[in-house]
Amino acid sequence: MGVIDLGNASYVYMKYSKSGNRGFEGSSNRSSIIFQVKHRVVFSMASALPVKQVTEEGQQRLTGDSFIRPHLKKLSPYQPILPFEVLSTRLGREPEDIIKLDANENPYGPPPEVLEALGTMKFPYIYPDPESRRLRAALADDSGLESDYILAGCGADELIDLIMRCVLDPGDKIVDCPPTFTMYEFDANVNGAAVIKVPRNFDFSLNVERISEVVEMEKPKCIFLTSPNNPDGSIISDEVLLKILSLPILVVLDEAYIEFSGLESRMKWVKRHENLIVLRTFSKRAGLAGLRVGYGAFPSSIVEYLWRAKQPYNVSVAAEVAACAALQNPTYLENVKNALVREKGRLYKLLKGVPFLNPFPSYSNFILCEVTSGRDAKMLKEDLAKMGVMIRHYNNKELRGYVRVSVGKPEHTDVLMECLGRLS
């Protein structure tokens, strides 16, 4: 499959057959097109894809799924969290009457400068800057890392997929450490990669010894790590991260929740570790989940190839305007972060008092709870939903019987605890 240049020619001759099929003079039914570009002949070869034929009343017809890559036919779709509008319809409640603690969103929203900037956008009809120069300059000031190392994306999710598209050939392997963010496994499956799972220890820490063994035996290309980890909120120490960085593997460190940990980002580490990528987002910190703005820090030897492969206009005008406006008010961002950290401490203590919940300490803006005393996690989620409170429950092997509660405003915690009290 591809394009073959046949060299210079003075003309190209095409004709239509009587049946209406386009073909070459003197040739029969060839799946090809020939055309002239500045007196140069280019021969475009059609792909020899297997075609599914269906017999229907003696006629054969194509079906669209014949063209789908076979591995995608077995792919299970990602299960996203529902937005307010859908929840409102399903629950029969106004969006304002729903306490949404299921997606780790920032309930305070962005700084006021964001709405003002969005309302005064001058050129929404012009394509955005393909290099997001204004945003990357602001991120350089914010992080202390030069903008040459920074690439922005339509959420960190786009960058995860972009990294895989640039690094993985079909059949290559990645290391995943569940329970963790399920997009790593999902995107690997989309890109035709194999996923080697190294489950976390009982306390959700990484099994570094097993990771080292897998890297040596299986030769995976990259490992995806999250710190603080979603969904348990644990962090990766410098010592552990350095051990993994010493392995011959590309390490993608997702810091979506780093602001709530009290720890410093490792973005600057990419200048001295050629096999490290660090991802960040505006979704949690700045309340911009709906506008999809993420960014990453990349070694200079890697970032140039991502620039070649990324979609040219991946960060919209609105997203860049909003993110830049949010960074103009660091006091607001700090105050909101502190409010959520304080409320997390309060929520943790209250959840400890619920007889059928066992909450885990968290460095993030959510708390993972084991559902105990014979209670069913899915039923707990559904009972709370009927009362207008949304939390996340899990049904995968590592977290069956667990729920995750996002930290909201104090009044959200009060409603949650009242509802849990009714279920005791």
Image (tube, helix red, strand yellow):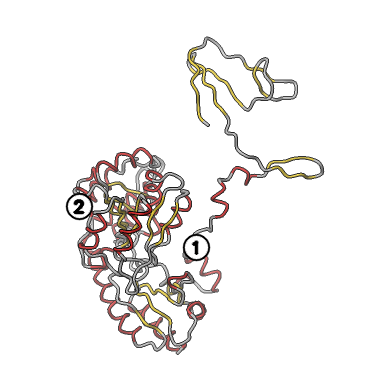
Count of labels in the image? 2
Q: Badge 2: few (under 14), some or many (20 or more) residues near its Cα, within 10 Å?
A: some
Residue 123: horizontal and vertical position, in percent? 37, 42
Mark found first going from the N terminus, 2 or 1: 1
Q: Amino acid at mark 2?
A: Lys
Q: Residue furthest right?
A: 57
Q: Residue furthest front?
A: 217
Where 408 sits versus 265, above or below?
below
Q: Nearer the viewer, residue 50 or 305?
A: 50
Residue 327: horizontal and vertical position, in percent? 25, 56
In percent of the image, x 33 and y 49: which residue is there? 320
Q: Which quarter of the picture shows residue 11?
A: top right
Residue 176: horizontal and vertical position, in percent? 38, 59
Q: Which quarter of the picture shows residue 414?
A: bottom left
In percent of the image, x 39 and y 45: which residue is there? 314
Q: Which quarter of the picture shows residue 330?
A: bottom left
- According to the picture, the residue beneath numbered tag 1 turns out to be 79
- According to the picture, the residue beneath numbered tag 2 turns out to be 268
Q: Which mark is residue 168?
A: none
In percent of the image, x 36 and y 48: which residue is there? 163
Quadrant (top left/top right/bottom left/bottom right) for the C terminus: bottom left
Q: Contact (CB < 8 A) between labels 2 and 1?
A: no
